[in-house]
């Protein structure tokens, strides 16, 4: 693949949005036009301001200098404040999606909220033939779509746990179920905190000690890789080491991020708490389950209540004191119900760990492909995705969306048997592709719905039937069966010209 470098300023024309950038104070929850700016969300809000609308012809790229974030836009929109609009110059053949992926992969060191567009203008863009640009875009699109799907699966599982919590315990602040309440200090033996010595600006190596950063708990999921290496000559106290089973809490951060709490299911050794993170040591685990307490503290209403306790001097980050935390009143349901809920959470977390590993692998693949593509090291003629990816990406399956109780006709005994589960999957798949009245879905989406519908079978299992959840092996078996049906002629693929897609259907007799 032949590559030529061209300076950014020679290849791309750019302009600020000026007064056409809609202030955040004017964003609506719904409206005629999406507001697309430099924030983390692709669409940051909505507006009805026709006078600010930009119509790409057919596309353009937005770049946020403050956030170092690029967005590809191919629909009418209203820009957010302080973004740059980028388009290829007439003399330069650059696909805008190719430009978007190039900008997304740039490694620009953060300088806080400074405008980083100066660094972007100094870079050079690798220019390849337009057809090769489109091949690169197609490849990265496929991987990116899978990444988005994995993130959606993880989000759906988090939402499931929230729903189960509210169903079992109700809103903890309103306490409509009437649980007895106790001050937090009555549930605690101690609130511990670590130290924050000067560390190196890198993650700790395998055999090094590290100190957690606030990012280790900010998402309310423990992330052990969010740490800084502790210099070898620095004295340390191993009492501050984080262990599996710990419940940790950020006492200091911005008002939006303070009071994040995470349960440590597993961790690498030699990680220490900083002084900005508390560890809750429970007084009696027969009274309160730490996993229940974790989900209680991060429930929307309870966390907001705790965040309201944060205070601090002007110009400093809000801080929650131990004294204020100890006085918080918390509902304490019977321990048997707490333990039942904790079992549900642990099962969901085990499913999440599979999807998280898949997501990590896909993001690593994406980074590698992107780096090679823009260095001209990718032999596009040699790239081919496995056959099953083509089915996942291109075959549309008409799924029955109204029958959420479809699995209800099957017994727990059938779901507990490998043969039974796989027989059920085949029957459902045939039913779904035979029905032409509903929304088209991909194989991956079909599998996601099946995973969601069968989750209830695994959450409340018994000793007689310990495994009812469909597994990755079941998925692989289903794919092999589909290929077999295609080869035998019992299934056939039909190309729908108007919709530009392939439809899988049962062959006519």
Image: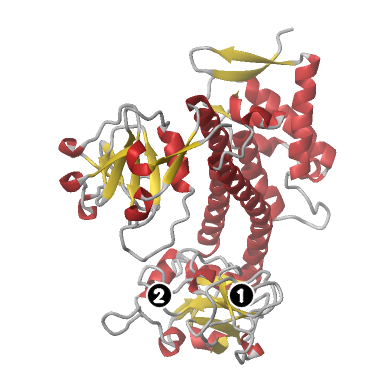
Name the residue carrying label 2: 253
Residue 232 placement (x, y as % from top left): 64, 85
Say which of 482 and 331 sits in front.
482
Residue at 37% over, 65% down: 111
- Indicate whether 497 appears above or below 210: above
Q: Quadrant of the N terminus?
A: top right
Residue 107 marker: none
Say which of 501 and 325 sits in front.
501
Residue at 21% over, 52% down: 23
Count the labels in the image: 2
Q: CA gap, disc 2 to disc 1?
A: 23 Å
Say which of 471 and 22 sits in front.
22
Name the residue carrying label 1: 290
Residue 59 placement (x, y as % from top left): 35, 31
In the rendered image, the residue lying farthest to the top is: 509
Secondary structure found at label 2: loop
Left/right placement of residue 204 relative to residue 308 reads: right
Residue at 52% over, 82% down: 278
Q: Which of the 4 quarters of the picture holds residue 58?
A: top left
Left/right placement of residue 49 relative to residue 134 reads: left
Q: Which of the 4 quarters of the picture holds residue 202?
A: bottom right
Question: Who comes first in sequence, dot 2 or dot 1?
Answer: 2
Residue 339 placement (x, y as % from top left): 66, 69
Residue 51 placement (x, y as % from top left): 15, 36
- Indicate whether 316 appears above or below 216: below
Residue at 51% over, 25% down: 131
Q: Which of the 4 quarters of the picture holds residue 410?
A: top right
Mark 2 surroundings within 10 Å by alpha-carbon count, few (fewer than 14), some (14 through 19), many (20 or more): some
């Amino acid at each position: 693949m032949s590559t030529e470098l061209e300076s950014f300023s020679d290849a791309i024309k750019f302009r600020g949005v000026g007064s056409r950038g809609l202030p955040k104070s004017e964003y609506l929850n719904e409206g005629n036009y999406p507001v697309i700016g430099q924030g983390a969300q692709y669409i940051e809000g909505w507006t009805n301001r026709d006078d600010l609308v930009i119509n790409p012809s057919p596309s353009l790229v937005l770049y946020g200098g403050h956030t170092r974030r690029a967005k590809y836009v191919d629909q009418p929109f209203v820009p957010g404040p302080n973004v740059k609009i980028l388009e290829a110059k007439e003399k330069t053949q650059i696909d805008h999606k190719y430009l978007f992926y190039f900008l997304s992969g740039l490694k620009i060191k953060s300088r806080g909220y400074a405008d980083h567009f100066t660094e972007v203008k100094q870079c050079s863009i690798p220019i390849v033939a337009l057809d090769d640009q489109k091949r690169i875009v197609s490849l990265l699109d496929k991987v990116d779509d899978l990444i988005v799907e994995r993130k959606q699966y993880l989000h759906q599982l988090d939402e499931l746990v929230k729903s189960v919590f509210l169903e079992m315990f109700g809103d903890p602040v309103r306490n409509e179920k009437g649980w007895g309440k106790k001050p937090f200090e009555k549930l605690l033996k101690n609130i511990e905190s670590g130290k924050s010595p000067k560390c190196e600006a890198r993650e700790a190596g395998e055999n090094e000690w590290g100190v957690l950063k606030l990012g280790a708990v900010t998402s309310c999921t423990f992330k052990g890789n969010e740490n800084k290496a502790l210099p070898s000559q620095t004295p340390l106290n191993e009492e501050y080491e984080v262990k599996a089973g710990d419940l940790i809490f950020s006492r200091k951060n911005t008002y939006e991020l303070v009071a994040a709490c995470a349960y440590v299911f597993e961790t690498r050794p030699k990680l220490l708490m900083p002084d900005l993170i508390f560890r809750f040591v429970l007084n009696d685990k027969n009274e309160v389950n730490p996993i229940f307490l974790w989900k209680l503290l991060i429930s929307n209403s309870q966390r907001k209540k705790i965040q309201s306790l944060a205070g601090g001097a002007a110009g400093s980050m809000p801080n929650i004191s131990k004294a204020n935390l100890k006085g918080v009143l918390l509902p304490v349901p019977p321990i048997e119900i707490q333990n039942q809920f904790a079992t549900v959470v642990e099962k969901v977390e085990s499913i999440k760990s599979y999807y998280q590993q898949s997501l990590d692998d896909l993001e690593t693949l994406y980074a590698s492909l992107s780096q090679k593509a823009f260095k001209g090291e990718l032999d596009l003629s040699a790239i081919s995705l496995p056959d099953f990816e083509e089915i996942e990406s291109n075959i549309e399956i008409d799924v029955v969306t109204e029958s959420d109780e479809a699995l209800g006709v099957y017994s727990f005994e059938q779901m507990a048997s490998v043969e039974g589960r796989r027989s059920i999957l085949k029957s459902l798949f045939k039913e779904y592709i035979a029905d032409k009245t509903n929304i088209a879905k991909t194989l991956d989406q079909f599998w996601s719905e099946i995973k969601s519908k069968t989750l209830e079978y695994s959450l409340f299992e018994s000793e007689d039937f310990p495994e009812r959840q469909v597994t990755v092996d079941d998925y692989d078996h289903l794919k092999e069966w589909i290929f077999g049906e295609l080869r035998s002629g019992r299934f056939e693929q039909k190309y729908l010209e108007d919709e530009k897609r392939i439809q899988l259907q049962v062959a006519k007799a």
